[in-house]
Image (cartoon, grey):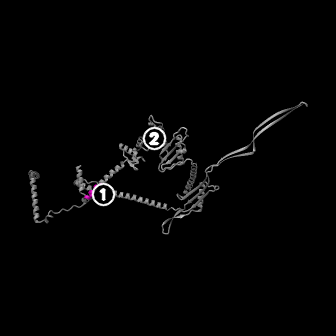
């Protein structure tokens, strides 16, 4: 390990301070990126546990999660809690069992904790609370309803008092974007009325979270009939309009046709009973015959006469036809259809040579064909006085063209931004690659020289090393080249120093023990002087 750090230090000494800083920065960036990538790959995927929580329930759930040491995140100002995806199902069941999820509603569970000795008033109150809770739980299961509240009023029956029926009110909190139809509201009112004894459907009021009444007021049968007629007419018009639009858009293209239909409906209800008699067609219902005989005796003339008579009673019935006619309500009296179609466009060039879209009106033959298609789609009947008008006018769509241009430019900007980001990333990777490659080449050269002349060069080699090996040998200079440039005195000193060095080396070779003692005395002398 020490040898490794020694070699590393030798390598770093061959670089300038700026190069050392760059190497350290690149090394730290690579380590940090690797650590961040590992943490990002291993981070848990969070999913929504509960939303729209009450602050009290949210705090209890967070406390439970902290106690279970499960990571979590909070969003929507503390009303939504997110946990790792692997724990969502288990935690939902756990918190539902604990009663922390949503708004717990008690129904007949109230009687599970009933106490002995409760008064009649408390029992009636608990019964009403149980009914309200059961109805609330049932209504909450309907699609589009977030939660609800049910209030029931049941007056007490007193002696010698006429029966007083109760009433109920329902408050609905709908999911965003949902609405209830008239039939659904009537169903909720019927559910409450048939679940509580003494409440009629017209005594149930249903309102939404904004206080708008969804049921009609009592005694408003005329309003109910008017609303029903309006909804029926609107439904017929929308159905026919959708049929015509689907037909025309297949010919003229999307958003190139506008259709408006007005339907005149007959809501009169006629009941007629008629009796028709046919005197020529007579039928015998019954016939009664009575016959008898009488005898007349004349004693004077000695005659005896017998007279017979017969009475016939016949009852006749004239043929009668009884008709009871009930006219249908909601039949179509007249249809009025107005259709506006756009023309076609073709590419052209203006005076400045710019490409434009030139409007081309549709021919009369094409309009007549479209009119025939519309008549067939709506069930045109000339005897009813139906009217179908098809006109061709250019549509004014400057906003659509501007929007299309905006989206095209936005798509182009997004594409170029993506290209620039990828280009910068690729350029950074390329620069990092060449930088690391240069560092590796320099390190291989330094390691080769650090390990001595017998060291094997690293894989890849070094260009400078190859140049040194392939370069021509340097010619040797004579020994007296630089000596002749010195003064006579310097030359004499240099020669005397050389002779002295040769004599010291010769003495050390002949007397190695004395030389070692002398060197040992030189080494120990500074230590003794420092102790003194």
Which residues are the magenta region? 16-26
118 vs 367, left or right, is: left
The image quarter in which residue 364 lies: bottom right
Numbered mark located on residue 435 in the image: 1
Residue 207 image point, x, y percent: 50, 48
Residue 123 position (above or below residue 226): above
In the displayed structure, would residue 298 be above or below residue 438?
A: above
In this rendered view, identify the residue nearer to me: 347 or 486.
347
Indicate the position of residue 339 as horizontal and vertical percent values: 57, 58
Q: Is residue 359 visible?
A: yes
Q: Which residue is mark 2?
A: 106
Task: Give SS at disc 1.
Answer: helix
Task: Give the residue displayed 14% in from the left and 66% down from the top.
Answer: 485
Which residue is more in the foreground, 502 or 106?
106
Whichever of labels 1 and 2 marks the residue nearer the N terminus, that label is 2
Q: Is residue 24 magenta?
A: yes
């Amino acid at each position: 390990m020490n040898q490794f750090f020694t070699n590393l230090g030798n390598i770093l000494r061959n670089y300038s301070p700026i190069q050392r800083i760059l190497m350290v920065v690149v090394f730290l960036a690579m380590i940090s990126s690797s650590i961040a990538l590992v943490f990002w790959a291993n981070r848990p995927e969070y999913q929504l546990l509960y939303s729209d929580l009450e602050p009290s329930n949210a705090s209890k759930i967070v406390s439970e999660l902290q106690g279970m040491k499960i990571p979590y995140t909070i969003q929507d100002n503390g009303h939504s809690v997110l946990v790792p995806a692997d724990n969502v199902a288990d935690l939902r069941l756990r918190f539902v069992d604990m009663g922390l999820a949503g708004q717990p509603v008690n129904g007949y569970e109230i009687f599970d904790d009933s106490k002995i000795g409760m008064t009649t008033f408390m029992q009636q109150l608990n019964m009403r609370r149980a009914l309200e809770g059961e109805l609330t739980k049932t209504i909450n299961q309907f699609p589009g309803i977030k939660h609800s509240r049910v209030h029931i009023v049941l007056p007490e029956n007193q002696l010698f008092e006429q029966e007083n029926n109760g009433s109920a009110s329902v408050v609905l909190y709908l999911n965003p974007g949902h609405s209830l139809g008239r039939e659904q509201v009537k169903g909720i009112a019927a559910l409450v009325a048939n679940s509580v004894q003494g409440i009629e459907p017209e005594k149930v009021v249903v309102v939404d979270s904004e206080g708008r009444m969804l049921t009609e007021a009592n005694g408003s049968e005329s309003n109910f009939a008017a609303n029903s007629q309006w909804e029926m007419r609107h439904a017929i018009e929308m159905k026919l309009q959708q049929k015509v639009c689907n037909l025309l858009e297949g010919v003229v293209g999307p958003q190139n046709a506008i259709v408006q239909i007005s339907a005149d409906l007959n809501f009169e209800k006629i009941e007629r009973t008629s009796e028709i008699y046919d005197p020529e067609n007579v039928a015998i219902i019954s016939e009664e015959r009575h016959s008898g005989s009488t005898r007349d005796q004349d004693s004077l003339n000695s005659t005896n006469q017998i007279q017979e008579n017969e009475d016939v009673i016949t009852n006749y019935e004239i043929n009668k036809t009884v008709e009871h006619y009930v006219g249908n309500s909601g039949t179509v009296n007249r249809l009025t259809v107005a259709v506006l179609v756009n023309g076609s466009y073709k590419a052209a060039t203006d005076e400045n040579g710019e490409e434009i879209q030139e409007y081309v009106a549709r021919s009369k033959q094409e309009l007549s064909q479209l009119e025939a298609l519309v008549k067939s789609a709506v069930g045109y009947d000339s005897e009813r006085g139906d009217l179908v008008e098809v006109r061709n006018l250019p549509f004014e769509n400057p906003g659509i063209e501007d929007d299309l241009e905006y989206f095209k430019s936005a798509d182009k900007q997004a594409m170029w931004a993506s290209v620039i980001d990828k280009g910068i990333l690729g350029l950074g990777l390329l620069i990092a690659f060449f930088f690391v490659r240069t560092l590796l080449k320099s390190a291989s050269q330094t390691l080769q020289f650090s390990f001595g002349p017998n060291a094997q060069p690293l894989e890849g080699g070094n260009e400078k090393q190859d140049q040194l090996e392939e370069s021509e040998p340097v010619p040797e200079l004579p020994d007296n080249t630089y000596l002749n440039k010195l003064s006579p005195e310097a030359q004499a000193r240099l020669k005397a120093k050389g002779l002295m060095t040769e004599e010291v080396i010769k003495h050390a070779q002949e007397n190695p023990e004395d030389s070692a003692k002398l060197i040992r005395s030189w080494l120990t002398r500074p230590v003794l002087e420092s102790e003194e």
